[in-house]
Image (tube, rainbow, N blue to C red):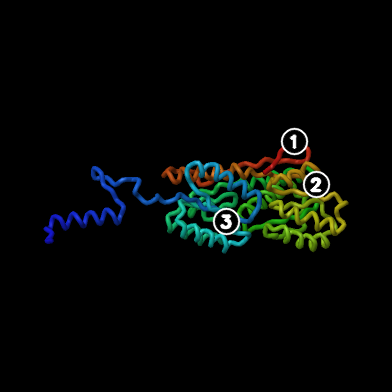
Amino acid sequence: MKMDKRNVWVVILLVLVVSTGTVFAGGQKDSAANPTEKTMKVGISVMFSHPFFDTITEGVKSVMEPAGYTIVDKSGEFNVQAQIADVEDFIVQKVDAIFIEPHDSVGIKPALIAARKAGIPVICLDSPAEDVDLVAANCATDNYDAGVKNAEQLIKDLNGKGKIIVLDSPQANSSLLRGDGFLDTLKAKAPGIKVVSQQDYAGAQDKALVIMANVIQGQPEVDAIYATNENGILGAIPAVNASNRDKEGIKYYSVDGSSGFVEMVSKGEVAGLACQQPYKIGQLGAQAMMKVLNGETIEKQIQVPVVYITPSTVNGFKGF
């Protein structure tokens, strides 16, 4: 049977409707027949696996998940190249936003450049990026003030005189600021306190243990040890004890605030601790990111204060 041109076009339209699953009503597509919309995702890469960073992530989730975002979290384990790879993977996954806690505040720059080229906003949590122009914001503990508060307590405990060891980790901007705040305060307020050794332990407990085992042997007089995070102290204490120096009353000071470390303060094993508020860091960072995603302007530097505790002021503080 011969088919006229009008019938041919009717058949073609029917084939198109069946093959695409598209139904038209009043000139509009049926939304029920549309493909599923892109899942909203947020990527998080932390410095290393630790309850502190788990708590930051929980703070982010408390804001982002109710807004419909899926969280993809990764850990760089003290390796900036791994964190760069994390960001590259987030870009491939086409996440809407990235949070990163960089182990190396300078070395992370290629990842930040890549994210910017992909049009994905980045907020650094806890450890700020050095090049703030490449991120939407840095949301972190007031790390300089954490160092200041530790120095002030140490000065008080030592009556302004003594010999101390400093364990720092200058690769991370957060640790660098804690060291600067501490040393600047000693210089300004306690010239009678001498730093007899300053060592880079890269933020790792095992490295702090090895370093302190060697350093303590060469320092016959040590009144206190300051480390820019708790891993430094957790490595230093067993090294001092193994050297039979534990009876000398060496005092320990640091920054962080996990529940186990807070307990050490309550027992008098640690003289002073600047406690961070990781859940609040995650919350405030996520709230700022929601504003960015909504096209709003935010502050470049979001500072979260520390809670300082000593054996006499811990007063039931639980930590994270």
Label 1 or label 3, whichever comes before in sequence order:
3
Q: Residue 79 — which label?
A: none
SS state under label 2 = loop
Quadrant showing the N terminus: bottom left
For the residues carrying marks 1 and 3, which lies nearer the camera in this image?
3
Q: Report, in whole angstroms, how far the alpha carbon at label 1 lies from the one at label 3.
A: 35 Å
The spot of residue 223 in percent (x, y) is 82, 51
Q: Which residue is mark 2?
A: 269
Q: Residue 274's quadrant in the figure?
A: top right
Hey, which residue is sitting farthest front in the picture?
1
Quadrant showing the C terminus: top right
Q: Which residue is mark 3?
A: 74
Q: Report, in whole angstroms, how far the alpha carbon at label 3 lies from the one at label 2.
A: 33 Å
Indicate the amino acid at tag 1: Asn
Indicate the amino acid at tag 2: Glu
Q: Which residue is mark 1?
A: 315
SS state under label 3 = strand
The spot of residue 147 in percent (x, y) is 68, 48
- Above or below residue 89? Residue 53 is above
Q: Is residue 206 left or right of residue 296?
A: right
Q: Is residue 301 left or right of residue 7?
A: right
The spot of residue 261 in percent (x, y) is 73, 47
